[in-house]
Image (cartoon, rainbow, N blue to C red):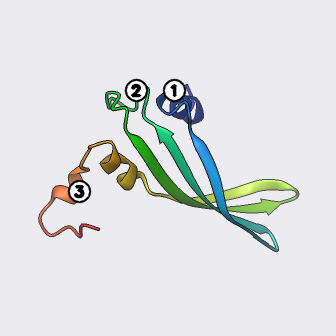
Amino acid sequence: MDLVARLRIAFPDQHFSLQDLIANEDRVVVRWTMEATHAGPLAGIPVTGNRVQQRGIVIYRFEGGKVEEIWAQIDQVGMLRQLGIEPLAARQPGMNQA
């Protein structure tokens, strides 16, 4: 099962809001926010019923009318914390906790 299908099962009511859409030459940048309820299994995390908000920025590079490269920065740690999961790296001594 692909990532999109797994996320649809985990967050069936997900709603995306677009904050920015910027295009310049061969690049398009999208800044978005997703809000949803954790209503299905997610990578071994039992259903919490928690509302979550996740933010991301994705940059697409086009060549010949097709997406050639994608760079993404998505706040997965923030979403895990909203689900009540504290990522291991955040618990390590000396790690910066945001």
Task: Tell me the element at label 3.
Answer: helix
> Height in image: 88 above or below 20?
above
Q: How far apart, in angstroms, are the residues tagged by discs 2 and 1? A: 7 Å
The residue located at (39%, 49%) in the rendering is 79
- For the view shown, which residue lies furthest in the left direction? 93
Q: How far apart, in angstroms, are the residues tagged by discs 1 and 3? A: 27 Å
Q: Which residue is mark 1?
A: 9
Count how many numbered circles sit on residues in the image: 3
Task: Residue 90 in the image: state x and y as whole percent.
Answer: 22, 58
Quarter of the view holding residue 57? bottom right
Locate the N terminus and report the quarter of the image it occupies: top right
Mark 1 Cα shell of 10 Å, populated few (<14), some (14-19), many (≥20) = some
Task: Tell me the element at label 1.
Answer: helix
Task: Tell me the element at label 2.
Answer: loop
Q: Earlier in the sequence, mark 3 or mark 2?
A: 2
Give left or right: position of 91 versus 17.
left
> Dots 2 and 1: beta carbons under 8 Å?
yes
Task: Residue 13 in the image: state x and y as whole percent.
Answer: 56, 34
Q: Earlier in the sequence, mark 2 or mark 1?
A: 1
Q: Which residue is mark 2?
A: 41
Mark 2 Cα shell of 10 Å, populated few (<14), some (14-19), many (≥20) = some
Task: Residue 7 in the image: state x and y as whole percent.
Answer: 52, 34
Task: Residue 82 in the image: state x and y as whole percent.
Answer: 34, 48
**Kind of residue indicated by mark 3:** Ala
Locate the C terminus and report the quarter of the image it occupies: bottom left
